[in-house]
Image (cartoon, grey):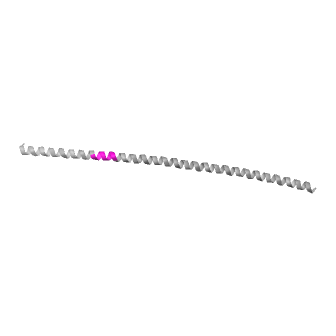
Amino acid sequence: MTPEQEHKLFHSVGSIEATQQAILEALRAQQTAIRESAATVNERLDRLENDIDRRFVEINNRVSAAELSQQNQANELSNLKVKMAAYGGAAGLITMLVAELVKGALK
């Protein structure tokens, strides 16, 4: 091999090594960027999961409050029905007593 060919060979090898080094550095930079992006995505997912959990609890509390309110309304309605039945029974009893008094007075 002539000195000129040897020089060209070493120059080519050096160029190949420089290219490989540049490619490796670019890949490392991309790897770092991907890891940073993954970390950002994971942070966003964590925030979304926390937001979903918080909203689920809020909605669950609202539903529980609505169910409790509905149960209270049902109890109040039942109590009102019992009162109306009692008033109706009392009115019927009073009517019967008045009728008996009127019958007794008319005799």
Q: Residue furthest left?
A: 2
Q: In the picture provided, is 60 more to the left or to the right than 89?
A: left
Q: Position of residue 58 (x, y in %)?
A: 52, 48
Q: Position of residue 37 (x, y in %)?
A: 34, 48
Q: In the picture provided, is 62 more to the left or to the right than 74?
A: left
Number of dots carrying numbers: 0
Residue 46 within the magenta-colored segment of the rendering: no
Q: Residue at the spot x=61%, y=48% of the render? A: 68
Q: Residue furthest top?
A: 1
Q: Residue at the spot x=27%, y=46% of the render? A: 29
Q: Residue at the spot x=90%, y=55% of the render? A: 103
Q: Residue furthest bottom?
A: 106
Q: Position of residue 60 (x, y in %)?
A: 54, 48
Q: In the picture provided, is 12 more to the left or to the right than 41?
A: left
Looking at the rendered image, the quarter that the C terminus falls into is bottom right
The main secondary structure of the magenta stretch is: helix
User: Quick one: 38 or 16, which is closer to the camera?
Assistant: 38
Residue 30 within the magenta-colored segment of the rendering: yes
Q: In the picture provided, is 104 more to the left or to the right than 71?
A: right
Q: Magenta segment range? A: 29-36
| Residue 21, picture quadrant | top left
Q: Position of residue 55 (x, y in %)?
A: 49, 49
Looking at the rendered image, the quarter that the N terminus falls into is top left
Q: Residue at the spot x=35%, y=46% of the render? A: 38
